[in-house]
Amino acid sequence: MTRFLVRRALWFLLTVWLVVSVSFVLMRAVRGGPFSGERALAPAIEARLAERYHLDWPLWKQYLQYVGPFDWSEHGTGFLGGDGTRPFGGLLALDLGPSFRYRDFTVNDILAQSLPISATLGALALLVALALGVPAGIFSAVKRGSTLDLLVRLAATIGIALPNFVVAGLLLVFFVFQLGLLPPAGWGGLRHLVLPAFVLGLPYAAYVARLVRSGMLEVLSSDFVRTARAKGLPERIVLVRHALRAAILPLVTYLGPATAGILTGSLVVEKIFAIPGTGSHFVNSALNRDYTLAMGVTLVYTVLVYTLNLAVDLAHALLDPRLAPEEGA
Amino acid sequence: MSADARLTGWLAAARAVRGAGPWRAALRRLVADRAALAAALFLLCVATGSLAAPFLPLASPQVMQLGEPRPPRLVPLGDHGWAHRVTLEFELEEALRSREMLARTEQTLVALARRACGAQARVFRRGQREETHGLALVLPYRRDLDPARGSELAARLAQHLAAETVDGKLHLRGGGDVAVRLVGASATDGYGTTSRFDAWLLARRQACFGFWQLGPLLGTDAKGRDLLARLVFGSRISLAVALAGAFVSLFVGVVYGAVSGYAGGKLDERMMRFVDVLYSIPFLFVVIFVITLLDAWQAELAGLGIGRMTAFFLVLGLVTWLTMARVVRGEVRALRQREFVEAARVLGASHARILAVHILPHLLGLVAVYLTLTLPSVMLYEAFLSFLGLGVRAPDVSWGLLAADALEAISPLSITWWLVLGPALFLGSTLLALNVLGDGLRDALDPRLGPAGGAR
């Protein structure tokens, strides 16, 4: 088990390192630099900016500065010739560097502000997905072949196929502009959260419903359910305590990709509903050529998603010993 | 004798049984799956409509009109002022009273126009009911007639007119004369098609429908452009990007998976571990990041012959090949153990030959299934990115872009719900059909996989 974890971590680090290095080189090789805009800057300002962001350094030194763990600037460690006020920096010291556009903020500042918002939204969306998907899946499996089952399956197919910005548009038209029930956009009370969380969670609810349905169908025809029924347990207990527990395993596996998808999907949803989360910042950074911010967010999300997937794999192994990762795999 | 007869009977019966190959059986299963069949037919319609967009009697997707966006109206095929024409305006000095004179004037002018530019014009009367004081001759658009492109149509026509004019009056065919003045020639190119195929389609459309076109069935957008036309023309880019991206993904996935599965051992393990790692990367972020970088490198890429769109679908293809690689690898591993591969190897076939001739043909069904399942995901990526303003850009149109425009245009003051509904219908139904067809194909080609197989 430990070996498995270590191996996976090593592979992951290797990938991240590759991605970071390649994009770093591409980023710095961009012609004109990140500050070239519509209006030309005065040479003195440009020189100051280059100095501030260390663009006047040779590439290898910029790279080492970005990756860390030592700060190579004049405030860096003593043995590199600095005064030692800020010895550590760079990715290895969990420092994602300064933002190129929001000049008074570091990428860390921006993430610290916006990640909690995105996390709240994502958690709510996941809740929506489970709260809608699990009951729908159970009912549809129990009443197999009924109109309800048909409706659930139809809704699930449509829910998976429709992209979330399309759903968002339709819901906005109906609930916000026609009925005036909810605020169109922004961040504040619970009312602001209803639509985004629903839109974000809907496709995953559809998937969850499908998974639970097929899992339940399989389990309901198994022997232990028949036994449970035969010994006279009420149907509710048979379903919840016996069947659901076994049917839920595929769902646990799916939680990893689902969380990743919700995190990714929140990019678009945050943009639509003007929510000041990490996703909005990321899209803006991409449109503004704020490379450090874009790269920082990409990195953080990659690590986040990877960790989640790993956690799900481990949870799965704990729930079902048959699936424990083989040694050496 | 009876045993013999029975034997011949069996043989005859066996001969009568038509063996169904795996493809035929799969096709039969697919046809039996009504949802998949409907999806396939629908997709065929979408593809045909998108390919033949200039042929369809649609309004112009480009010509703007001032004013409020208009909601959908059920206006059937009619003459709504086609925005792809050359107009010649004539003014009559005095209103003609007799209908016959008017008809003669029209005939003369049409003949004049035919001599000047070799096309049959249609005449529109300008003026109050009985009092016609102007005539507009309308020709199908041609580049060589466009004054904006340097055509001297007006001058040529004026010459012809002068040749037939005596004492300031045009001599009419069939007798009589009338004072006519050429006011001007103008052209609107509402389709701006560049490829020869599209130009040919437009010409066919003119032959079939003349100046008739559909009304704003899905309404018009904030700039007064017909939404239906924009959706149909936009489908070309959406579908093209999806297809190209899916084929890139197919190519990478099949090659990677086949090599990995065929090589086996350490190499296989490493290659698959790499895929595992890539699986856990949130690709939308990476794609956006890469696209911003590519934007900065546009000039260099153009030097290599890679345009913006090419780079775009290359990137999309390069992030969607993982599932394909995994599935292909599994299948190749199984195929590698089979006797016919062993036989080929014993006969001295090279590895490349075994892969290409003996193994790849067996992957066809599998690849078809995953191609139909990759298409919607590439389409979704395209729509997402265009929606965020990072993919297709104006003046090109795609469904994602239209959805983005819709959300930008809508406000409590003008609830332009039709702008949201149109892209939702097109994008949603196409994605739905692709998903249904993919599932159907998978069930048809490999019933063992079942509906839960390949859940990712």
Image: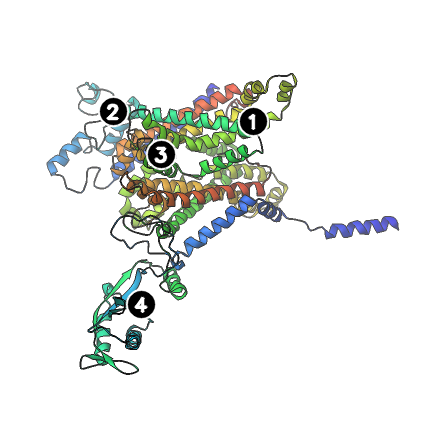
Q: Quadrant of residue A174?
A: top left
Q: Would residue B428 appear left or right of B336 to someone viewing this image?
A: left
Residue at 28% across, 77% down: B101
Residue at 33% across, 26% down: A191
Dot 2: chain letter: A
Q: Are marks 4 and 1 on the same chain?
A: no
The answer to the question of whether label 2 and label 1 lie on touching residues, with beta carbons closer than 8 A, is no
The answer to the question of whether label 3 and label 2 lie on touching residues, with beta carbons closer than 8 A, is no
Dot 3: chain letter: A
Q: Amino acid at mark 2?
A: Asp
Residue at 32% across, 70% down: B121
Look at the image and tell me whether residue B188 can be seen: yes
Residue designated by label 3: A175
Query: Residue A279, position in %: x, y?
Result: 31, 31
Dot 4: chain letter: B
In 3D space, how far apart are the residues under numbered discs 2 and 1 (Cα atoms)? 46 Å
**Furthest-right residue in view?**
B1
Q: Amino acid at mark 3?
A: Phe
Q: Give the mark, 3 or 2, whose residue is nearer the N terminus.
A: 2
Q: Is residue A315 above or below residue B163?
A: above
2 vs 1, front mark: 1
In 3D space, how far apart are the residues under numbered discs 4 and 2 (Cα atoms)? 64 Å
Residue designated by label 1: A216
Q: Would residue B262 appear left or right of A124 to someone viewing this image?
A: right
Residue designated by label 4: B139
Query: Residue B240, position in %: x, y?
Result: 40, 49
Q: Is residue A5 above or below residue B320?
A: above
Residue designated by label 2: A109
